[in-house]
Image (cartoon, rainbow, N blue to C red):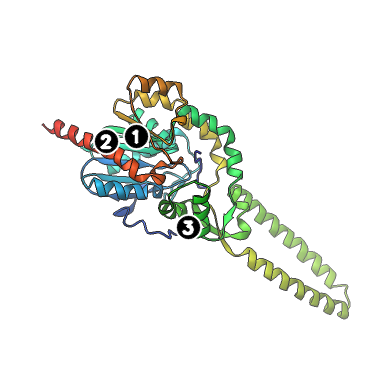
């Protein structure tokens, strides 16, 4: 399944990581871009740059375990991952703009600050991030691209899956009572099949809210504001009515009324306490990205084949390759294909060791090419 999410409240509290990622990356920091900030994770300091672009609704943490394992095997590389707009800890103006043009502009702005003119770059993108990697590379938004690797991104398969996305989204739990419950759900449903990775990546997709707000968060924040305003107006009407009633009632009636109100308030307090309990709900409003779904994936196959760098397509099964353009391109030897069996859509999380082996080959080839270029 493809993850098409974006963050609809930038001031929301992203859930605290319960599994440390500090051994996965060396450092994290923010860079200023067009009045906003993009959150960056890095590991290593020299060698070819491995630029990681996560799928929609996920965050850089979906590449955390892969990054640790990749650098253990390839110490001579510099890994860069960033939270795209509306995701993770990135905070930008107009986060709801998830158009290809905007996302490619973001990639270019990030690369301008983090990648040097002499760096050789391997771009790896998953799902929506893979589609954006193709769009960005084909538009020359990333400098010195030596290789492009896209994970489980096939245009025809992605476009066919769009019709069932709303049903899939509605089948997810509205909230979780604990991070442990969320991780267990993630693994049980095989959304991510690797529990170690799920413990690192799942918190980045959730945030703490009051239980009473969990349902409202399925809609837009503006709808929540409308509810608040309506409640305030209702309270004003009730207060006026209560004052009018008090003016005409007898002392005995007033005493009985106050006693009943005390009992009612006690029950209301118990209910309020339950509603004020914190739960974990999805950090993103998934449906609001729907206008961009087709734009993300349409034309990706042709753009992928047209990229002049080395190309690798990683899929979770041979059944994913339903795209005629890619089938012909693969038969003509225009790109390398690697199938990871026993994996779901999140290949980099389910089978990080398998992906590391393939990417290690890319890094080796880039190192050879860079040495030849220096001569």
Query: How would you rate the neighbour count of disc 3 (Cα within 10 Å): few for under 14, some for 14-19, many for 20 or more?
Result: many
* Residue wearing tag 1: 149
User: At x 68% / y 70%, what residue is drawn?
Assistant: 270
Q: Position of residue 72 (x, y in %)?
A: 26, 50
How far apart are the two marked residues, 3 and 2, measured between alpha carbons? Answer: 34 Å
- The tag earlier along the polypeptide, 3 or 1, is 3
Label 1 Cα crowd, 10 Å radius (few <14 / some 14-19 / many 20+): many
Q: Is residue 70 above or below residue 199?
A: above
- Asked if residue 177 lies left or right of residue 359, the reply is right
Task: Name the residue nearer the viewer: 346 or 254.
Answer: 346
Element type where label 2 sits in the image: helix
Marked residue nearer the N-terminal end (1 or 2):
1
Q: Which residue is mark 3?
A: 15
Residue plotted at (60% across, 52% down)? 174
In percent of width and height, residue 215 lies at 63, 53
Please name the residue that numbered disc 2 is placed on.
362
Q: Disc 3 or 2, which lies upstream in sequence?
A: 3
Q: CA distance from mark 1 to mark 2?
A: 9 Å
Q: What kind of element bears circle 3?
A: loop
Q: Position of residue 332 (x, y in %)?
A: 34, 19
Query: How far apart in space, not on screen, are marks 3 and 1 (Cα)?
Result: 30 Å
Q: Quadrant of the C terminus?
A: top left
User: How packed is label 2: few (under 14 Cα within 10 Å), some, or many (20 or more)?
Assistant: some
Task: Determine whether the residue tagged by mark 1 lies in a helix, strand or loop.
Answer: strand
Quarter occupied by residue 262: bottom right
């Amino acid at each position: 399944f493809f993850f098409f999410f974006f963050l609809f409240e930038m001031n929301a509290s992203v859930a605290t990581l319960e599994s440390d990622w500090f051994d996965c990356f060396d450092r994290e920091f923010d860079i200023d871009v067009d009045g906003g900030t993009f959150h960056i994770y890095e590991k290593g300091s020299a060698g070819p740059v491995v630029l990681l672009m996560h799928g929609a609704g996920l965050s850089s943490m979906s590449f955390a375990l892969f990054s640790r394992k990749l650098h253990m095997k390839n110490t001579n590389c510099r890994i860069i991952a960033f939270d795209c707009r509306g995701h993770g800890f990135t905070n930008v103006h107009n986060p709801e703009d998830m158009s290809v043009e905007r996302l490619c502009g973001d990639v270019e702005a990030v690369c301008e600050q983090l990648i040097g003119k002499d760096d050789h770059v391997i771009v790896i993108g998953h799902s929506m991030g893979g589609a954006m990697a193709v769009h960005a590379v084909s538009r020359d938004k990333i400098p010195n691209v030596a290789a492009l690797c896209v994970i489980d991104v096939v245009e025809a398969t992605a476009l066919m899956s769009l019709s069932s996305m709303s049903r899939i989204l509605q089948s997810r739990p509205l909230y979780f009572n604990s991070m442990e419950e969320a991780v267990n759900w993630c693994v049980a449903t095989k959304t991510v099949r690797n529990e170690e990775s799920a413990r690192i990546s799942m918190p980045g997709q959730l945030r703490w809210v009051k239980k009473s707000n969990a349902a409202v968060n399925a809609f837009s924040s503006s709808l929540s504001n409308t509810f608040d305003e309506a409640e305030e107006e209702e309270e004003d009407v009730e207060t006026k009515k209560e004052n009018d009633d008090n003016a005409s009632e007898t002392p005995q009636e007033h005493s009985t009324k106050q006693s009943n109100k005390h009992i009612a308030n006690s029950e209301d307090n118990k209910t309020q306490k339950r509603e004020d309990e914190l739960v974990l709900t999805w950090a993103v409003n998934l449906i609001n990205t729907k206008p961009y779904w087709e734009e993300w994936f349409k034309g990706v196959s042709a753009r992928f084949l047209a990229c002049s760098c080395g190309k690798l397509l990683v899929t979770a099964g041979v059944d994913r390759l339903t795209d005629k353009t890619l089938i012909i391109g693969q038969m003509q030897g225009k790109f390398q294909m690697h199938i990871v069996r026993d994996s779901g859509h999140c290949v980099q999380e389910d089978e990080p060791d398998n992906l590391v082996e393939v990417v290690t080959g890319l890094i080796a080839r880039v190192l050879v090419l860079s040495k030849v270029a220096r001569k």
